[in-house]
Image: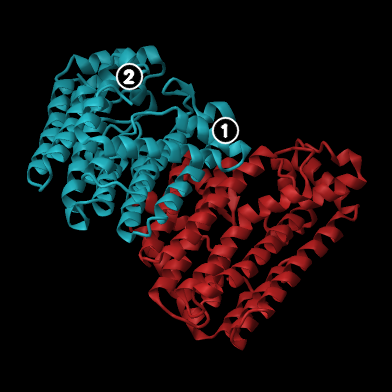
Chain colours: A cyan, B red
Amino acid sequence: MSTHSRPVLEAAGPSVASLLARTEQRLTEIASGHGDALGEHAVNTLAAGGKRLRPVLVFLCAGGADSDDLVRAGAAVELLHMATLVHDDVLDRAPMRRGRPTVFWAAGRKAATSTGDFLFSRAFAELVQTANADAIRALSDASSALAQGELLQRADAFSPDVTEERYFERCRLKTGRLFEAACRLGAVLGEPGATAADGLGAFGDRIGLAFQLFDDILDVSGPPDQTGKGRGTDLLDGTVTLPLILARREDAALRDARPASTAEAERLCDRIQATTAIKESRYTALGFVTEAKRVLASLELSEPQRRALELVADGVVARYS
Amino acid sequence: MSTHSRPVLEAAGPSVASLLARTEQRLTEIASGHGDALGEHAVNTLAAGGKRLRPVLVFLCAGGADSDDLVRAGAAVELLHMATLVHDDVLDRAPMRRGRPTVFWAAGRKAATSTGDFLFSRAFAELVQTANADAIRALSDASSALAQGELLQRADAFSPDVTEERYFERCRLKTGRLFEAACRLGAVLGEPGATAADGLGAFGDRIGLAFQLFDDILDVSGPPDQTGKGRGTDLLDGTVTLPLILARREDAALRDARPASTAEAERLCDRIQATTAIKESRYTALGFVTEAKRVLASLELSEPQRRALELVADGVVARYS
C-alpha cells in the first residue's frame, strides 16, 4: 500500500481493511492454483503489489457493505488491471516494473502474452461468481475500453497531430473507464445499489482522468526517485501526452520529437518543462479532482464514506506533489 | 463455410441457418462499431471467415430454439476463438492465415496484441447481455483454459519428455474446453436447458479433442493444398504433438528434433510418416469421434438434432480424409 492509503483506510473503517486483506488472499489463491508455469508468472505479478487502488475504490463505494461478492469484484478489477500491465510490458519490452523484473523479461513474450490472457480470463471468471449482470457488464465495458485505448495509443504513436480532445478520449478509455467500473461495482454489489452507480461511476471516471494526467506529468517532470523510472519514457515510446501537446504550441522544435536515447529524452523533458505546459497540465488535472469532489458532494453518502472518497481524491494529487 | 457444413445445415433446419446469418451480421457490427484503427483489424479478422464451427455447435445444441441470446452466444464463442488466433499469430510471427495477411503482419505486434485483447473483451461483453450466469461461467472457464493451454504449449516447447497424457491435457485446454463451452451455451440458452449441459458438453469436449488431433496429424501428413500451409509448422514452433511423441518411440533421431528450416521440417515429417505414428494417431482421433457419438446416443435428443450433431462429428473426420 502506498503511504497515502493509511488515512483512507482509517476513515473507511475496519470493513474495508478486512475486504482488502481477503482480496489479497484471493489473488494469491487464483495465481497459485493453476499449475507451475502459470503460477510462477502470475504469483510474481501479484506479489509485485502496487497500490490496489481499484479494489479500494470498489470497497469505498460499497458504503460499508461487506460480502464475498465484493472481494470477488475487488480481485476482478485488480486482475484486469494486471492483465493490461503484463501486456503493456510485452508491447514496450519493459525489463522492470515496481522494482521487479517483468514477466516479459523473466519468461519471454510468449509466456507473458499468455499470462496476460489468463489474468484477463480469471477477472471474468471471478466476477461471474457474483451472478450480477450489471457488475459483469461494468467489467466487460471497461475491458473493451482498455483494449481500445491501447489501440488508440499505438495508432497515435509519434503523431504530431494528436489533439487535446483525442488525448482525453484515450485517458478515459485507458484509465477512466476501469476506475469508473470499480466504483460501479462497489455501488451495485454494496449498500448504495444500482441507482447510485452512475454517480459513483462519474466520480471514478474523473479520478481516473486525474490519475492518468498526473502520471503523464510525472513522466516529464520526475523526479525519478519518486516515479521509479527515468523521465521521458512516454517520449521514447511515442506516447503523445498533454504536456507534449501543450508544449508544442510554444516550442515548434518539439513537434517532431523522436528521441533516440534516454539522454535525448531527458533533454526533451527539460524543453517541455521550460514551457507553461506542466503548469497548465497540472491545473487541468486538479480541475478533474475538483470535479470529482463536486460529484461526491451531489451524492447521498454517509459522512465516513464521503470522507474516505475525498481522501482518495486528495491522494491522487498527493502522488504528484 | 466449409463444404461439409451444407449437409449439417440441411439436417439442422432453417433456424440454424438463420441463427448463423444473424451471428455473421452481429460479428460485423461489433467489429465495425469501434473506431477506425480497431475496426480495420477486427473487420479483416472476421472477414477472413473460417468454418464458424463453434457457433454451429451452439445452435445445434440449442435443439431448435431460436433467440437473440443464442446469436450473442454464437458471436461470443467465435470472438473468443478469433482473439486466441490473433494472439497466436503474434506469438508465432505468422504472416498469413486463411489466405490473408494476419493482423500481426499487416499492423504489427502492438496493434495485434491489442486487437486480440479487444476481441477477448467483446466476447464477454456480448455474452453478458444474456444475463445468464451459467452461460458466462462456461465462457470464462473456457477462456482461462485457452490461456493455460497456450502457456503449457510454450512451457513444453521443444521438450523431448512430453507425455501422451500431457499432450491430451493441452489439447483439452486449448481446444476441447471451448468446444465444450459452445455446446453448454447451446444447452443452457436453448431448448435442452441446464440439465442437458453436461452431456452435450462432453460431446463437445470429445469433438474438440478429435479436431485438434486431426489438425496435428495434418501438420505432419499434409497435403499442403488442403491445409493451406506447409508441413511441419508444429516442428518449427517446437509444438510437440502426438504424431511426434509416438514416432520418437520408433525413431530415436526424432527425440531432439529441432529443424532450422522448412525443408528440414519437411524431412522430419517424412521420418514421422515412415513410422506407425500417423496411423496410431488417426485411430486415437477416430476413437474420440466414436466416443462423441456414444455420448450423443445416451442423450435425449430429437432425431434432427442427433443427426445434425453426428454429421458434425463426421465432418471432423472428413476434414482429414
Name the residue carrying label 1: A40
Name the residue carrying label 2: A227
Q: Quadrant of residue A251?
A: top left
Check the image and name the residue furthest to the front: A14
Residue in the foreground of this view, choosing between A315 and A112: A315
What amino acid type is highlighted by mark number 1?
Answer: Glu
B52 left or right, relative to A71: right
Which marked residue is nearer to the observer: mark 2 or mark 1? 1
Q: Is residue A258 visible?
A: no
Q: In terms of secondary structure, where does tag 1 sit?
A: helix
Q: Quadrant of residue A306?
A: top left
Task: Name the residue: 54% across, 56% down.
Answer: B142
- Horizontal and vertical percent for residue A249? 17, 26
Task: Name the residue: 26% across, 27% down.
Answer: A5
- Dot 1 alpha-carbon crowd within 10 angstroms: few under 14, some 14 to 19, many 20 or more: some
Q: Chain of mark 2?
A: A
B280 shown above or below A226: below
- Horizontal and vertical percent for residue B294? 72, 75
Task: Name the residue: 68% across, 65% down.
Answer: B206
- Dot 2 alpha-carbon crowd within 10 angstroms: few under 14, some 14 to 19, many 20 or more: some
B307 shown above or below B178: below
What amino acid type is highlighted by mark number 2?
Answer: Thr
Residue in the foreground of this view, choosing between A106 and B221: A106
Check the image and name the residue furthest to the bottom: B303
